[in-house]
Amino acid sequence: MQYSFCFFYFTEMDLRRGNMKTKKLTAALLAFSLVLGGNSVFAASSNNPVQIASSDIEYSKEATEALDYINKIRKDAGLGEVKLNPFLTKAAENHANYLNAGNPYDHDEIEGKKGFTGVTPKDRVLAVGGDDTLARRAGEVMLIDGSSVKDSIDRMLDAAYHRRPFLIPSADQIGVAFVNKRFVMVDVGFKENGDSSLYPYDGQKDVPTTFLGASEDPNPLRQFGLTKSGYVISMYVPYTLDTKKIDATIKDSKGNNVPYYAEWYYGFWFFYTKEPFRSNEKYTVSVDYKPLYNPEFEGKTLNKTWSFSTIANVSSGGSKSETTSPKPETQSNNKEVTVLIDGVKQTFDQPAVVKNGSTLVPLRGVFEALKADVKWDQPSQTVTANKGDTTIKLTVGQSTAIVNGKKVTLAAKAEVINGSTMVPLRFVSEALGADVKWDNATSTATITSPAGNVGGGNGGGQVDQGGSQVVNGIKVSYGKHTYASANQSQYDQVMKIVNSAVAETKSSGTLVDYYIRYIDGDRASNYAPNTDEFMELKIAENSIGQLVSAGATKEEITQVYLGAKTGSNLLKGVKDVGVGDPISAYDALVGGVTDCDATAQTYSATFDSFGFSSAVLGGSNHADVYVKVHDTWFKYTSGTFTKVNLSKIPSTMTIFSQPTFGPELTK
């Protein structure tokens, strides 16, 4: 089954009124598209974006059914009702018909395609006569292959981030369409937000036991190294919280503590237990939290405590315990497989497996880790991957692939497992020239990037990751970079620290939400000055704006951001002595003291480890790190990437280290 999610954000101004001040808290409601595999019915209908009067629309049976079911859920959860809005409903119907015309599954429509009524949900609301205030707040959520209205809504509630539009207290108007399995809901929120939202709600019964991270994109569990957890618990309270100060417990009926991970995401707290819940069990959640900007609660700790019960055991007649459809495949001969790419353990939505004697790995996860661009075509069930001069095409169910126009026979047919296209491990080597080794004793696949092919879109060139290149008597891993180490021992200690930090960041690091919004086209000019949204997007503009304008992809920006974040984390607590003796990453990471030279060398090491080309340059009394992204050089300082021209270095500057790979810099 093929899963595909995307998000459409809109802003909800959540007003907090107090005697001292009013605080506006940004809460970007998530909207998403879920594509479930199976035979889809495509309708050839089309809608003209004609404007309607509020009395021009009759609500369909499906729309009223959805409204009743959503309001039942909201009532059970202690939330206020929502109402159908004619403009939102017409916009939802138009987009459902657009999707049924065989167009790409996306929130953005393509002008000229059959059924087009507007690029974005906002455009589609305006097209049918909704005013700008309504359109600006319009968010959209879609499910492509729901068996019914109820099934569509249930699947969304069973996700983590994606249940949010149904359970946000301030929501008050929706538009819903369900046409040939395409469910589309457009929603807005205007109510002043004074309610809390808990889910599973207090007293809820027959709660599923398990949440599978691979059923949601982005996968909430990836950051914690989990593939599944207990059913997601969410909490929203109508206050601005100090998100670093929250204390929660989850206990079973015997009072035993249940270990969990917690995440704050756009006003909601999500709790993921480390193991699935037991069936026929009662769980109690207790959360202590401290509101900010509310004088009546100053210095006070508030509490929310509620309980729910899980479903009966399936074998005893209860409902299903897992929250995804279909359930994950289980194979009697599957083994848990560890995948190492360039020495870093990988976490995939669908783990690699051994099936019928062949080791199958997720094509997208592995290829993207090797800096290939991967695209999926749903109608033809074909994957296309591009890296440098290599183009690969592979169709699910076939035992051959096309590599640069030549047919390659696979050891096993490509197949989809839990939404991921799986291919034989050996194909990675055949397709991209990577070195692949298999350790049967430990079920470990080790994949090493091909020489001269590391770094993807960062400029190409040679990176020796085998530790065979010797510079000043030191065996190095990246280019000729020693990070100013005095000897092999210092270098090895630096790389041990850096590699550990990079592995941790790669497994759990994410791009901050307002950076994602900026990359996706949201700008501070869309909001009033001094609002949270305005300030967040200004931060993003100052930090990554020039990366975006240079054409860097979201993946490139994410990786270079994580490289910078790793360096920043490593330097926390290190004493900055200004201009002085510290000159190396060793001085900073082991000696505990730094200045501009040691700081630049540390960042150079983390950028290198993320596959980028870096260099360290300096003037008379200062040094900076430079990193190449999307064939463009940027100077990185204090969280900001600034585009620079390094085609010729001024004679007044010193080149402390040449680029990791590619042509050397010249004066």
Image (cartoon, grey):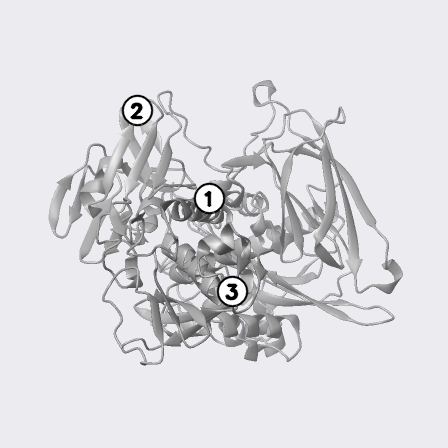
555 sits left or right of 590 in the view: left
Residue 29 placement: quadrant:
bottom right
Amino acid tagged 1: Ser
The answer to whether 530 is drawn above or below residue 331 in the figure is: below
Mark closest to the chain's N terminus, 3 or 1 = 1
Image location (x, y in percent) of residue 108: 43, 66
- Per the image, label 3 sits on a secondary structure element best described as loop
648 sits left or right of 109 in the view: left
Disc 1 target residue? 500
Instruction: Give the residue displayed 23% in from the left and 47% down from the top.
Output: 450
Q: Residues within 10 Å of mark 3 (few under 14, many from 20)?
A: many
Q: Is residue 138 visible?
A: yes
The tally of labels here is 3
Q: Residues within 10 Å of mark 2 (few under 14, many from 20)?
A: few
Q: Nearer the viewer, mark 2 or mark 3?
A: 3
Relative depth, front residue between 24 and 381: 24
Relative depth, front residue between 246 and 314: 246
Instruction: Give the residue displayed 45% in from the left and 35% down from the top.
Output: 326
